[in-house]
Image: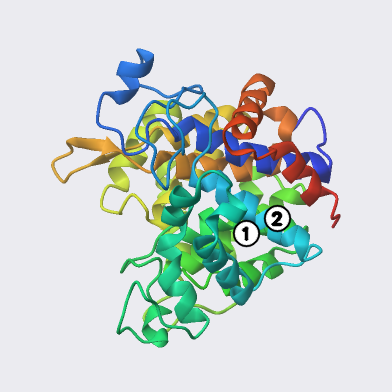
Amino acid sequence: ELPYMPTMKDRIRGSVLGQALGDALGAPFEFAPPGAVREATGKDWIEGLCAFTGKPGPHGPWVSPAPAGTGTDDVRYNRLFIDMVVELGGRMPEDVDLARLLLDVYERPGEYFPGFEELGRGQFEMFEGVSRGWLGQTSALLPGIPPAILATRSVGLNYPTMAGLLVMPSAGLLFPQDPEAAYRAAYAAAFFDVAYAREATAVFAAAQSLALAGAPAEETVEAALEMDPLQLGGYFGGPYIKDNLPALLARARGRQGRELAAWLTTELRHFSAFDPYRALAIVFASLLAHVDEPLMVLQVAVNHVDRDDDGVVRRYADIDCYAGIAGALVGTLFGDSALPADMLEQVIESNRAVYGIDLEEVARRLADLGP
């Protein structure tokens, strides 16, 4: 039990700042070669914020060197989603709302991210084709492909990704005490997700709705994984996430910290680094193992590598995404005061300095909408 009871505004602020904190923990090392963490920190375990010194790219930090606490595309997506929610007066964006937004950012990146036009366009290029297809348009980048096919392309890939979990990690905050509505709305809005990626986006929104209402961590995960309001099961079995993740979480029980991170890395090695099942497994297992240690949840989520079939480490995985998703849920569960104040301050200052994103203002605007 918490030694205090976070208010709903505490939880919303915690979610926004927790997501940015998790993103920043992993940002310097996502897809980095083996040994990168030891070279930078002298340790083999990411436990704090580090400066970014790599090459800027559309999906990572946009300046280099960047101060510790700087976010990647993940924090930029969340800011855009929350801005749209505020513009809609607190209404959950629908599929066409998000399609128009993602396409507009691609076409006019300088309006959304002044000073970063080309990097902004590069970040949102992967949404161009599926957004045009969903809106019944053709794409100059993908000539000859009809809209109906463009609309099935996920983010240009041919397998499920974390796109929904990254674009709308705050969706569940719009549905306090109504996890089924959160599930339905997130599933419907995630037009760029395919296969069980839409289910993963919906399950996470349901979990966040439960957390916002004050449900304990174990109850939050269990209840979210029991849900199937859209009857996704069929002739050959039930929903993929609902059918498979509980068994993996049961096998993970009893493991903590480094042991858990290593075990998850091995168990999930056959899933792509971008896979939403892998992301949810890491987030939920980390949370259940450390229900009284919010920062440790983020540390377990961020310390993951990709291994080949022989067990050899190839690189660090998409760790800023795993930790950012974990932070959005942990912050909702425990509120902002449960996370280290000095780390949050560093994240707030760095994102303000680098991108002009005021995370405190973003959180305040969302919280002021009320339930």
**159, 27: nearer the viewer:** 27
Q: Is residue 39 left or right of residue 301?
A: left
Q: Residues within 10 Å of mark 1 (few under 14, many from 20)?
A: many
Residue identifier under label 1: 205
Element under label 2?
A: helix
Residue 129: give x, y in percent of width and height.
41, 72
**279, 267: nearer the viewer:** 279
Q: Tell me the quadrant of the picture where the C terminus can be found.
A: bottom right
Nearer the observer: mark 1 or 2; the answer is 2
Q: Is residue 18 above or below residue 204?
A: above
Query: Badges 1 and 2: C-beta atoms under 8 Å apart?
Result: no
Count how many numbered circles sit on residues in the image. Answer: 2
Q: Is residue 154 left or right of residue 211?
A: left
Residue identifier under label 2: 83
Residue 178: give x, y in percent of width and height.
75, 64
Q: Which mark is residue 185?
A: none
The image quadrant that residue 197 belongs to is bottom left
Q: Is residue 132 left or right of residue 99?
A: left
Q: Is residue 81 above or below residue 301?
A: below
Q: Is residue 18 left or right of residue 337?
A: left
User: Which residue ends up furthest to the top in the rendered image?
Assistant: 42
Q: Is residue 234 above or below residue 260?
A: below
